[in-house]
Image (cartoon, helix red, strand yellow):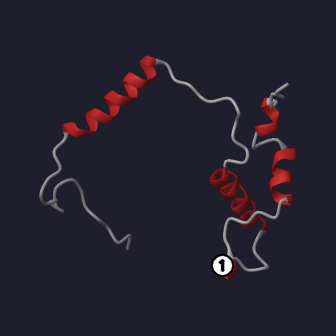
Amino acid sequence: MISQAKEHDHDPYNPDVLHHVRSSGARAIDGGTSSKSQPAGQSQTETWLNVQAKGSAASAIPQTSTSAERDLSLQRWLDTYKHEIPAYYDQKAGGSVSSGK
């Protein structure tokens, strides 16, 4: 019998999942890049980046899209080619830059 994972078992916002990731000792940055006295926010950020990179909290249920969604996505991508990229950019066309002084 194959056991089915419950959706909350893979929810990255579930405190149990985050605790498991933290307790596994996984690190997003190896070596001496991070200092021992790093802020708590940085440690949490590194944990979340590791979760994302490893896919350790990925859902067992794949996301699907409808054919209409795929068609719209393809059309948005194709529309990006409607505007020619100029050989040179004219700095005076389109605005100005101020130093704020």
- State the SS at label 1: helix
Q: Quadrant of residue 79?
A: top left
Give above or below for 21 relative to 64.
below
**Residue 70 located left or right of residue 31:** left
User: How many marks overall?
Assistant: 1
The quadrant of the image that shows the N terminus is top right
Q: Nearer the viewer, residue 43 or 7?
A: 7
The picture places residue 71, in percent across and down from the top left corner, at: 37, 22
Q: Residues within 10 Å of mark 1 (few under 14, many from 20)?
A: few
Q: Which residue is mark 1?
A: 33
Q: Amino acid at mark 1?
A: Thr
**Residue 3 located left or right of residue 29:** right
Q: Quadrant of residue 97?
A: bottom left
Give above or below for 41 relative to 84.
below
Q: Residue at x 83, y 59 (%)?
A: 24
Q: Residue at x 80, y 31 (%)?
A: 5
Q: Residue at x 62, y 30 (%)?
A: 62
The picture places residue 41, in percent across and down from the top left corner, at: 74, 63
Q: Residue at x 73, y 66 (%)?
A: 27
The picture places residue 10, in percent across and down from the top left corner, at: 77, 39
**Residue 20 located left or right of residue 34:** right
Q: Quadrant of residue 53?
A: bottom right
**Residue 66 located left or right of residue 50:** left
The quadrant of the image that shows the C terminus is bottom left
Residue at the farthest left position: 87
